[in-house]
Image: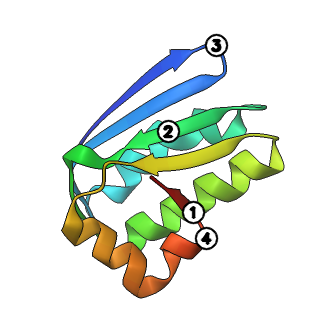
Amino acid sequence: MNVQIEQNENQYRVAPAGRLDTNSAPQFQEALEPLMQAVQAHVTVDCSGLEYTSSQGLRLFLMLQKSLSKNGGSLVLTDMQPAVKEVFDITGFSNIITIR
């Protein structure tokens, strides 16, 4: 998995690429740590390069959302591939996290 993060003031764009599973979740979590600590960070995750997410990935997205909300920020996921969107829909995460 590859994760790119771009920052413009308190706006962040995160672009994960590849599979988000048990093996890659620690790397993804490490990349997200600074965002989870940021105050009033508004994060957009471009999911166009995300091929798959397991429950570990869902857990990380939920952790990110909770941290951002607690610190006055927000999270939006965009451009999901159909297979990834289906995982969010089946698990009910598309009702918890904003997806565009």
Q: Which residue is mark 2?
A: 44
Question: Which of pointers 3 and 4 lies earlier in the amino acid sequence?
Answer: 3
Q: Which residue is mark 3?
A: 9
Does the CB distance between marks 1 and 4 fall below 8 Å? yes
Question: Which of pointers 3 and 1 lies earlier in the amino acid sequence?
Answer: 3
Spatial CA distance of label 3 from label 1 is 23 Å
**Furthest residue in direction bottom, as rendered:** 90
Indicate the secondary structure of the residue bearing disc 1. Answer: loop
Left or right: 3 as drawn, with respect to 42: left
Indicate the secondary structure of the residue bearing disc 3. Answer: loop
Inspect the image, locate mark 1, and give the three-letter code of the amino acid beneath it: Ile
Q: Residue 79 in the image: x percent, y percent?
A: 31, 48
Q: Which residue is mark 1?
A: 97
Q: Residue at x 51, y 59 (%)?
A: 61
Left or right: 32 as drawn, with respect to 14: right
In the image, which disc is placed on residue 96? 4
